[in-house]
Amino acid sequence: MAKARAIVKRRKAVRNIKKITKTMQMIATAKFQKSLKRAVGTKPYTLKVRELVRELAASVGNVDHPLLRRPTDENRTNRIALIVLTSNRGLAGAYNGSVLRAANAFLKQQMSAGKTIDLIVAGKKAISYFNFQKRPIAQRMEAQDTPRFADVERLADALMKDFIGGKYDSVHVAYMNFLSAGVQRPDVMTLLPLAGVDNTSTSAKPQAEKERGPYNVQTMYDFSPEPRVLLDELLPLTIKTALFQTFLDATTSEHVARMVAMKSATDNADKMVKSLTMQYNRARQSQITTELSEIMGGVEAMKG
């Protein structure tokens, strides 16, 4: 009877765990739906701002801006900044591990090239990881379920100031890139210098020739104020929106990873309950058979 009681206690514990994982799955689903709307809603704006910057840069020609500066041998400091975005909580499958592996691989690559890295870490999981590795952390941030643009803007302003001042040669972000509800990939994005803008004057020519059509008509744009003035305003905005998008993608990826992990845990708990029920039935049946055998043996002994 002791074995059957142990199985009953274990089955009860698994059922209680199942209730918890089911509740966490529902919470993660609600947070994911809310975060998905923000991430998907801001992405077209982020892409459109970058597209507008490219058109302006193509109209200006050779763009010379501090945010596009690429370090030369004379002004190279060999110091870069890496922002690592993880979660505050676990139980999110391979989410945090994938981001940290990508960040660690990037760190080893840059350190082997002789770079000094300043770590800017968001999320308790990354803070614990780098503390365990005894890597110094330049700045610590707390991961938020709902990232606020004002907080990201302050971080972007500080990074742009340091980059323009020559403190950093480049700024990178390690995060989980949200592609769809079923696909998220760890990525290390180069935030500064801003890529894909300074070389658009040459790459835009073939596309412009295609758009002229059979009548060899080229579309001309008038900008007010001047394109260079607009670039001074739009380039920092492009950096801020790109950084904010990484925070939104990271948060959305975290929620979908936790949702999937908790659903898997709930399904596994369901299977375990069924397995334990079968074990209990077999143990109970064996005990009943043993008791009946003992009773029949006693009756036969009394007859003799």
Image: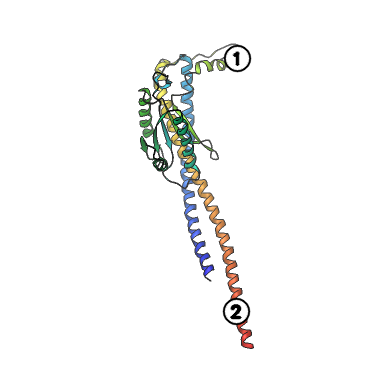
Label 1: which secondary element: loop
Residue drawn at point x = 55 percent, y = 58 percent: 272
Three-letter residue code for mark 1? Gly
Instruction: Give the image location of residue 180, x and y in percent.
Output: 54, 37
Q: Residue farthest to the top?
A: 216
Dot label at residue 294: 2
Residue 232 sits in quarter: top left
- Is 26 above or below relative to 130? below
Query: Disc 1 versus disc 2: distance between alpha carbons?
Result: 98 Å
Residue 241 sits in quarter: top left
Name the residue beneath numbered marker 1: 213
The C terminus, quarter of image: bottom right
Instruction: Give the image location of residue 90, x and y in percent.
Output: 45, 46
Label 2: which secondary element: helix
Residue drawn at point x = 62 percent, y = 85 percent: 301
Q: Which one is in front, 271 or 216? A: 271
Residue 130 sits in quarter: top left
